[in-house]
Amino acid sequence: MKFYQHTILLLLCNFSTLSSQGNSFNGVQSDLRLVDLYENIKNKIGKKTYSNQKIKGTPYFEKTFKLAEVEYFGELITDKIYIRFNAYNDEMEIASSPLTKSSDNILIKNNKVFCIIEGKTYRYLGFKEDNQPPAVGYLKELFKGKLFSFYERKFKVYMQATVARTSLERSFPARFVEKIQYYYSVNNGEINQIKLSKKNILYKLKPHSSSIKQFMEKKNSKLKSLKDVVEMFNFIDQ
């Protein structure tokens, strides 16, 4: 029973503790629990849809539910909660057992509700993709330092089937396509996109270019691998 009590706590709201804080870029939404309620209802009944035809791939990177830690507005939920990330709907589906096949329950989409799955922290945050308007979504925390934060956004998009019109073209089945992007923030400010390339990193982090070049020389790195970029943020954060 305790699990379901906490599930209700996660999915619904505590109307007696309304806050008056406003929105912020990385705050995603205000702390009003009433806002959480309507946000959650919208997510549950307004999921993205796709045709029922045979689709290559799935909306998930991991089909099984994993044991997770959940922090809800500063309170660590101590009961066992299992979570599976729906990379197409951008939702954290929750269940009471790792054997669960499907679930209609999701974690509230709020920056003050986050989860840790297999040692990795997932936060619902506002971010800015290059040449796109601001958006919100789940980001995996790759590095969290005194000055810098570095995140991965891994998601899936649905591509409709296409039929070749000529012998020179190819037909493609309906499919889910994997996408990966990376983001950073300085002093907990705006979360902006960054690419795993020396040119882009030096451009985006121009005030820290001397430290970055020092790292590259010391590690003989061209900043092309994710491991090197994480180590770079750790180096320049000191």
Image (cartoon, rainbow, N blue to C red):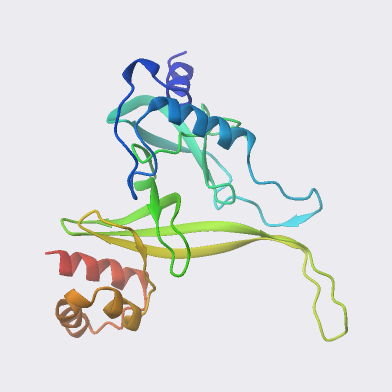
* Nearer to us in this view, 140 or 14: 14
Q: Position of residue 232 (x, y in %)?
A: 23, 71
Residue shown at 34% from the left, 41% from the top? 23
Q: Position of residue 205 (x, y in %)?
A: 25, 73
Quarter of the figure that contains the C terminus: bottom left
Residue 94 can be seen, yes or no: no
In this view, the residue farthest toward the left is 238
193 relative to 21 in the view: left or right: right
Residue shown at 40% from the left, 38% from the top? 110
* Nearer to us in this view, 106 or 45: 45
Q: How many labels sit on residues?
A: 0
Residue 23 can be seen, yes or no: yes
* Vertical side of 212 occupied by 135: above or below: above
* Vertical side of 196 occupied by 153: above or below: above
47 relative to 128 in the view: left or right: right
In this view, the residue farthest toward the right is 166
* Nearer to us in this view, 204 or 23: 23
21 relative to 196 in the view: left or right: left
Residue shown at 40% from the left, 64% from the top? 182
Residue shown at 15% from the left, 56% from the top? 146
* Vertical side of 29 occupied by 227: above or below: below
* Vertical side of 82 occupied by 164: above or below: below
In this view, the residue farthest toward the top is 1
- Image quarter of residue 5: top left
* Nearer to us in this view, 17 or 184: 17
